Amino acid sequence: MKLILKAIRLILGELIVLLNWLFKPKTVRRSASEQAQLDQRSEALSLYQFRGCPFCVKVRREITRLNLVIKYCDVNRHESYRSELESGGGKVKVPCLKIQSGESTEWLYESSDINRYLAKFAVSK
């Protein structure tokens, strides 16, 4: 039974990824200097995620729509990312946005909360 559920999850995840690729959201357009400033600020963000997770796809779509450059850390494919998420965030749950601010690090869970944060981040200076 576990194997069947895992197979169904894998197939549905790949279908979601395909649909996301076919129907990409339109991106926000900015001046080159505004985009460069945002790209520089975005270096402080990392998204810990699974490729086929529907909630992770939701966040990645928002990242694409907002035209943000954020590092993706696939915790299924890289044990080091999984370990970092567990030790830093306290649990292996995705999506999770890692926010570096100087010496402090914040770990933000829940796709809707992450998308709200990213929307504010993209318009702040």
Image (spheres, rainbow, N blue to C red):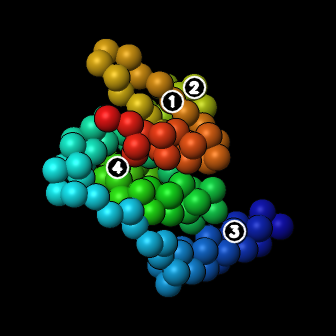
Q: Assign a secondary structure to mark 2.
A: loop
Residue 94 visible within the image: no
Please report the residue visible at 62 percent of the width from the left and 48 percent of the height from the top: 111
| Mark sitting on residue 70 | 4
**Badge 2 is on which residue?**
90
Labels 3 and 4: the sequence-earlier one:
3
Question: Which dot, 1 or 3, sits closer to the camera?
Answer: 1
In the displayed structure, does residue 42 sit left or right of residue 37? right
The amino acid at mark 2 is Gly
Residue 108 location in percent, x, y? 55, 33
Quadrant the N terminus occupies: bottom right
Q: What element carries label 3?
A: helix
For the residues labelled 1 and 4, the Cα–Cα distance comes to 15 Å
Under circle 1, the secondary element is: strand
Spatial CA span between label 2 and label 4? 21 Å
Mark 2 in CB contact with mark 4 (< 8 angstroms): no
